[in-house]
Structure formats: structure tokens, C-alpha cells
Amino acid sequence: MESQWLAEVTNDPRRDYDLCIQLSEADVHWALIERTDSGELVLTVDPSTRLVQIPAKWLAKILVAAEEDLPGGE
């Protein structure tokens, strides 16, 4: 059975509630897409004791959308 990944735009309480995108699989949060103070888009992956495979084509689409959806870019 193929895993179901979800990208959800939400607020990050660690960064004054700036918008970010949470990446989850089966209701488990694995990573966060956010902008740095300089405006760079970054992917932060949570530490895990197991191998986590995020589908590359799906992630590429999410990153392209994040470039436009998250404020602070060029």
C-alpha cells in the first residue's frame, strides 16, 4: 500500500506564527518548509529513527507551490 503524504499550510509558533508548510505521512509530521529571515526557502526534516522516504515528484510540486505561497520570497 502506498503511503499518503499531506502538505498543509499552517502557522509556525516558533517563528512568530509565520506561514509554513507541514509535510505529514499517516498523521505523523516529518518535515517543514519555511522561509529563513533572509527569504530563502528551506526544508527542515525532523529527526527519525526510521528511514522516511518522501516522494520526489510530489515534493518538487510542493516546493514550487511554496515558492509562491509563502511570503518573503523575491
Image (cartoon, grey):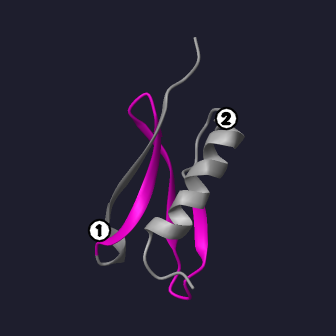
Left or right, 42 with reference to 68: right
Name the outermost residue toward the top. Answer: 1
Return the residue at label 2.
53
In the picture, the quarter occupied by the C terminus is bottom right
Name above or below for residue 4 compared with residue 22: above
- Secondary structure type for disc 1: helix
Which residue type carries mark 2? Gln
Q: CA distance from mark 1 to mark 2?
A: 26 Å
As for residue 23 lying within the magenta part, the answer is: yes
Taking depth in this image into account, of 30 and 34 the one nearest to the observer is 34
**What kind of element bears circle 2?**
loop
Residue 5, percent across and down?
Answer: 50, 34
The kind of residue on which mark 1 rests is: Pro
Q: Is residue 44 left or right of residue 25?
A: right
Q: What range of the chain is rendered magenta?
A: 17-43
Identify the residue position indicated by label 1 in the image.
Answer: 13
In this rendered view, identify the residue nearer to me: 60 or 38: 60
**Residue 10 in sight from this viewpoint:** yes
Q: Residue at coordinates 67% horizontally, 35% vertically from top-left?
A: 53
Is residue 45 visible to the viewer in this orientation of the structure?
no
Chief secondary structure of the magenta span?
Answer: strand
Locate residue 57, reporting x and y percent.
69, 41
Residue 56, by quadrant, is top right
Q: Residue at x 64, y 38 (%)?
A: 54
Specify whether residue 15 is painted magenta. Answer: no
Q: Which tag, 1 or 2, sits closer to the chain's start?
A: 1
Badge 2 density bin: few <14, some 14–19, many ≥20, Cα 10 Å? few
Rendered view: 25 above or below 62: above
